[in-house]
Image (tube, helix red, strand yellow):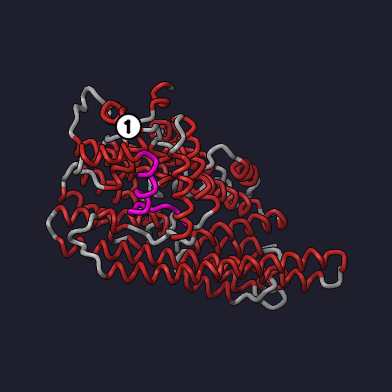
Amino acid sequence: MSSSCYGQGEGGYYRFLDSANVTVDINSQKTLQFLDSIPKPLEENIKGRIAEYYSVKALIHDEHNEYTKFQQSNILALKYAVEEDNYCIAGQASLDLHTDKYLIAADTADTKYLDKAKMYLEKCEEDKYAVLQIETMQSYYKSLDGKFKESNAILLNRLNYYRSIKDEVGYYYMFANYMLASNYLQLKNLQEAHKYLKRLKKLKNNKTILLYNYKSFMASIDLFFAEIYFEKTQIDSTFYYLTNASKNTKYMVGDALQDYYELSASAYKHSNNIEMSKAYIDSLVMYGNNLFVDNLGASFDVNNDLLNAESELIEQKNQKASILKIVFWLLGFIVLVSLIYYFFYVKQRVHLKKVEDKTKGLSYLKSNNEQLTVKVHGLEAYIKNLKKEVKDIATTKCLEEQKSRIKELYTNLHINSSTILDKSESHLELVNELNIDFFRKIDETYPQLNKSEVIICYYILIGFNNKEISVFLNTSIRSVESKRYRISKKINFDKERTTLVEHLHKTFKDTLHSTIHDN
């Protein structure tokens, strides 16, 4: 059945969904108003297109960096898409859920959603090119794992094909050029990076590419170039690309926007423009506060959605006595979860107020820049419990067992807690207890290293890779690589004969447990 036929259905609510589809790439607020105009229960008012409703909602939440709501909407979109035989939406929702699991939960082995995405997208008759998303995302995953050459190989093998269909659907050619430019930057090949950036810019007026997607890619690639030039201390080039990126800040995803504030503050500080540096640091702190509040709000909204869904279920099934006990049990469970969330919400609000009061008294000119990037995510009571667990880990003599327990600790943090360890002093305080001798010696040997760099040195010493460290510090792999480069410059060892890892092992081997050496 076509969209126009649906729009003439009982109640005429399909027209709001049609309007939402038209405005979703132009005005997300208006789109949300259209969706909110559709009354519940959805099964009665937009029957047959509920998957489309949640798919549009997922796009809005993605634009606003509302990750919890984004995941919830995709789960519902997949559920109803399967029921409605809407394979295109089922495939897209499955791919988004796989990517979310890959990035947030760091679960690279589970391909359940990826396999579903491929199966559904191959059945998508409305978009014959939809299945191409699988191979482009596989190149993206390779890049995330630091396998930039392998990522490029996937894209270069298909680049001519993507170019041949760019007038029908330009997204894949745009994505390929963006990824190639990004990967070559990571490989320090500026000539190739500029070549693909130039091709990316030529797609600006391609009518098949959504403005939001194009500007989002351009904002990210400009930021990548700015970071590379800042590492080279080419400040004029750094500000050139930061200026370009600033034109598209509203299209940046959460991590990119945070990196933009941090890099801008550092660049202005390097140029001795303290006022501008302070302004960007203030923006970063405000962003962290807003993100914290938004995540709390998202948790409540998800619970409200679940509560409403159960209420609808009760209305629809009230004559079936065989399921009444299950319904009431679920309702009671949701109320209990809501009360728990409310308790943490009140506690977080009090903690947030204390943090804001302390922030007003900080001297931004004297404080370490990275300490000001704190995102107000920590729960004090939770951190106290973590300290006890860290002390227990510190007594472990075997390096492999200690590494395994540290990984398990961080995995539990990401899966079971809304509180992620940040790059603040509390993180250093926890990690410091894992090896007090190391942290005392590195402070004496290299006092020029800041707290974040000291933490990274410790993780490198005990054998964690960049991806694992980025998960521990809740930052990007690119940021970890950048900090490793700065560490190497600060401690000034013979880089031609020795790697950073070898230098750390040679310098601090006496701080490791004797049983570790035996292993």
Question: Looking at the image, which residue is at 17% across and 61% down?
Answer: 365
What x and y, as percent, mark residue 298? 52, 66
- Left/right placement of residue 194 relative to residue 349 reads left
User: Can see residue 40?
Assistant: yes
Image point (57%, 51%), residue name: 92
Task: Name the residue rendered at 33%, 40% in the picture.
Answer: 436
Within-10-Å neighbours for mark 1: few <14, some 14–19, many 20+:
some
Judge whether residue 99 can be spotted in this image.
no
Task: Inspect the magenta stretch and tell me whether residue 429 lies in it.
Answer: yes
In this view, 389 is above or below 438: below
Residue type at the position of mark 1: Thr
Q: Is residue 326 left or right of residue 186?
A: right
| Residue that lies at the very extreme toward the left in this rendered image | 272
Residue 37 % position (x, y) = 59, 77
Q: Which x, y percent locates residue 102?
A: 51, 44
Magenta region, residue range: 419-435
Q: Which residue is mark 1?
A: 511
Image quarter hosting the N terminus = bottom right
Q: Quadrant of residue 341?
A: bottom right
**Magenta stretch encompasses residue 257:** no
Nearer to the camera, 305 or 337: 337
